[in-house]
Amino acid sequence: MFREAGLRAREQANLEGARWQKLVWNLPFNGVSVMLDAGTDALLKNPASRQLIRDLMQEVVEAAEACGHSMPESLADKLLVGTQRIPDYLPSMHQDWQHKRPMELNNLYGEALRLAGEAGYSMPRTQALLNMLQFLQDGYQ
């Protein structure tokens, strides 16, 4: 359908695996940008926030693999390099938070935690980030 409309598209054989792969970038950058009130440039330039993002990315990669979805080799590092090449960016969750809209915490974090837990994999960094984001969303700023 996309090709017929003249749009470039790439098919994904495993939709669930593709979702996990997308989550490797989305989970850390969305939440950390809110918690630190910063865009991608600042987050990657600071060694501490860059390491936090990389650790979260790796946790998502390991959770995906625990759930039976193979991830590309060195995915976290490749995504970090790719993010450095794009203009400074404020992820959608940061924009929701700025405009006082509900953040999609369950969709982005709760579901990953649930699926990983069912597979016997713990995501402590992700759980901690979710707890902090929930605190903000509940209005205890």
Image (cartoon, rainbow, N blue to C red):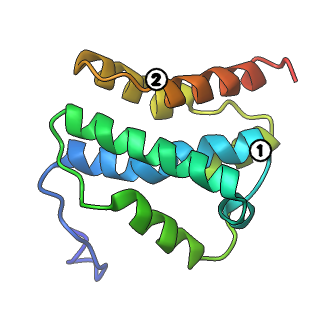
Quarter that holds the N terminus: bottom left
Percent coordinates x, y for residue 10 in the rendering: 22, 70
Q: In the image, what residue type sits under mark 2?
A: Gly
Q: Residue under circle 1? A: 36
In the displayed structure, 8 sits above or below 90; it is: below
Say few, some or many: other residues with alpha carbon within 10 Å of mark 2 (under 14 / 14 to 19 / 20 or more): some
- Name which of mark 2 and mark 1 comes first in the sequence: 1
In the image, 11: left or right of 104? left
Q: Residue at x 72, y 42 (%)?
A: 34
Q: How many marks?
A: 2
Q: Residue under circle 2? A: 110
Q: Residue at x 75, y 62 (%)?
A: 42
Q: Residue at x 85, y 17 (%)?
A: 140
In the displayed structure, 93 sits above or below 67; it is: below
- The image quadrant of residue 87 is bottom right
Looking at this rendering, what residue extends furthest in the right direction?
141
Percent coordinates x, y for residue 57 in the rendering: 45, 47
In the image, 25: left or right of 88? left
